[in-house]
Amino acid sequence: MQEMILDGRKALVTGAARGIGRGCALELARAGADVAINDREHSAETDSLLAEIKAFGRRGMIVDGDAFSRPGCENIVERTLHAFGWLDILVSNPAYSRRGDFLSYEPETFEKVLQGTLVGGFHMSQLVARDMVKKGRGGKIVFISSVHARVPYAGSVAYNAGKSGLNHMAFTIAAELLPHRINVNVIEPGWIDTPGEHETFGHDAIDKAAPTLPWKRLGTSADIGRAAVFLCSDDADYVTGTSLLVDGGFALRAALPREEA
């Protein structure tokens, strides 16, 4: 059984119904945290996640709402604080991505991706940080970024821009929150086996690609969740303003020796 290194901590995870957000919520609960889970709508997925959190003996709650907008974030934070009293941890994982060629990419889609990937993270982290500063308890803020923040993959102009901006925003926030002992860090997942990836690429393509990756598999949501637990624990007390790449060597593929034809 995992050590309860987050015992008694109060956490909020946005975009938590499935994929990486769900993995983070579950691993935080497994490590002892009470977890408020946010997704746009109450669903069977949020219900099942809540049941899993409670099965760990932790307190959980569903806070449905729009984490892309300022009013939505205000409502989410207000309801969470009303129930929990305070927050020790925020895992900011709002996500919206649409691929497409730069020359034909719709401006409205570009703005929506940035709104979900970058702007929503600003709203949520500012609101939570304000309460952390007010309460004077310190805290941990973790932004879920992507390997796309460092590798400009073609066909992902908006997502690449959003995640790169998210990293720099996080590091700026980390600098400003130093006096308040609030750790702010970023996780950059590589190719993670999530429902969204299967919807984008298809099951067959993912099954075929997995053995070709440096680690011979895609990452899992639990891989990212365990990284979040570390960054939210006292073990990472001296870690702030940094990015943790969790990708099984995905970003290093170009450095590997090429097989002779």
Image (cartoon, rainbow, N blue to C red):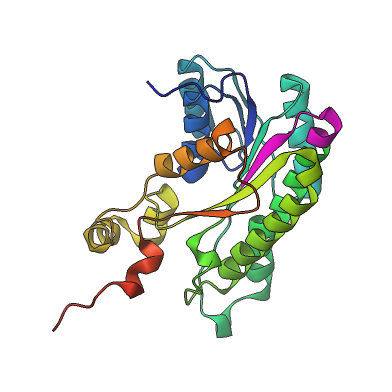
Residue at 49% x, 75% y: name it: 155
- Quadrant of the snapshot with the N terminus: top left
Image quadrant for the C terminus? Answer: bottom left
Residue 167 higher or lower than 187, as above or below: below
Q: Position of residue 142 (x, y in %)?
A: 61, 45
Asked whether residue 11 appears in the rendered view, the answer is yes
How many marks on residues? 0
Q: Residue furthest left?
A: 261
Quick one: which residue is furthest to the front in this view?
238
Q: Name the residue: 36% across, 60% down.
A: 249
Which residue is at the far right? Answer: 134
Q: Nearer the viewer, residue 237 or 222?
A: 237
Residue 205, horizontal then vertical, whole percent: 28, 62
Residue 156: x percent and y percent?
52, 71
Left or right, 227 with reference to 85: left
Give the magenta part as a residue range: 131-142
- Does the magenta run of residues contain 242? no
Whether residue 17 is visible: no
Q: Is residue 45 left or right of residue 108?
A: left
Q: Position of residue 186 (x, y in %)?
A: 59, 52
Residue 134 included in the magenta stretch of the image: yes
Who's the residue at 62% across and 70% down the image?
161
Q: Who's the residue at 69% across and 57% down the image?
A: 171
